[in-house]
Image: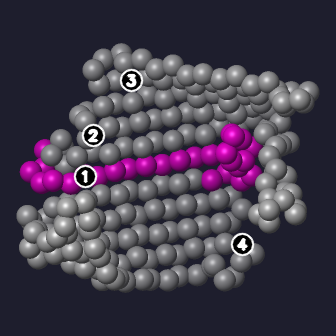
Amino acid sequence: GDAPAFGGGVEAWATDRLRFGATLMSESAGADDQVIGGADIRFQLSDQSYAELEFARSDGPGIARSTSTDGGLSITTTGGALAAADAFRFDSRFALEDLGFGRQGFIGLYAERKEAGFSTLTEDITDDQTLIGIEGEVAATDRLTFRGYAESFDKDNGEEKRSAELNAFYDLNENWTVGVGIEVLDQVVPGDASRTGERADAALRLDYRGFADLDVYAF
């Protein structure tokens, strides 16, 4: 029969800006139980600005799952036989106006660290991995807006990825906006030469907003 499982979460606001939360899930997995627990804290500066830190730990044999990509002709089983491991996540987004800048826009910082063996209902981590990124947007003038991000990802198996993108959007008038952007990527995928290397892409985009609830754009 199906393995019994239970879980739940609780959160409470200590002040108008500070929230604490906790979650716990347990599922019977044969001789041992798979237990996933977590705790988080969130600082809410305003409706548009926040910072959040989360810690999670999984302990047990992992959660095995079966998938098929050909309609059931072949079945692949993944997961299981994992150990206790931790994961950390930081996420933030601050409106520039809340930081004292007299312009519309935002800046965000985020990071993740997952240890080998960390297992949830949706993923099984086989190698330690780290993700760090920054994103933002700023209205330089009433018509000109810049938007971009930069991100770094590393795994202990040698996989690496560095990516960044910068876009500029200029409102020609109330209906027409022209945008230009460039994206760069540098990555290493062990065992896959076709996905390893550097590349850069540029794009030009024209948007038209002349009808209610309808946007038209072309590259």
Q: Position of residue 7 (x, y in %)?
A: 65, 23
Crowding near the residue tagged with mark 2, few <14, some 14–19, many ≥20 C-alpha atoms within 10 Å: some
Viewer-nearest residue: 28 or 75: 75
Q: Residue 81, located in which quarter of the rendered image?
A: top right
Q: Mark 3 — residue? A: 19
Q: For this view, does 170 lie left or right of residue 106?
A: left
| Type of amino acid under label 2 | Ser
- Amino acid of disc 4: Pro
- The residue beneath circle 1 is 106
Identify the residue at image location x=74%, y=43%: 117
- Reading the image, the residue beneath label 4 is 190
Q: CA distance from mark 2 to mark 1?
A: 9 Å
Query: Could you tell which of marks 2 and 4 lies nearer the N-terminus?
Result: 2
Contact between labelled residues 1 and 2, with CB atoms less than 8 Å apart:
yes
Quarter of the image that includes the N terminus: top right
> Marks 3 and 2, how far apart in space?
14 Å
Image position of 197 with respect to 120: above or below: below
Marks 2, 4: nearer the viewer: 2
The answer to whether residue 89 is visible is yes
User: Which x, y percent locates residue 84?
Assistant: 75, 35
Q: Point out residue 4 in the picture as x, y percentages from the top left corner.
A: 79, 24
Q: Which residue is mark 2?
A: 49
Q: Which residues are magenta?
A: 100-129
Q: Residue at x 57, y 46 (%)?
A: 113
Disc 1, SS? strand
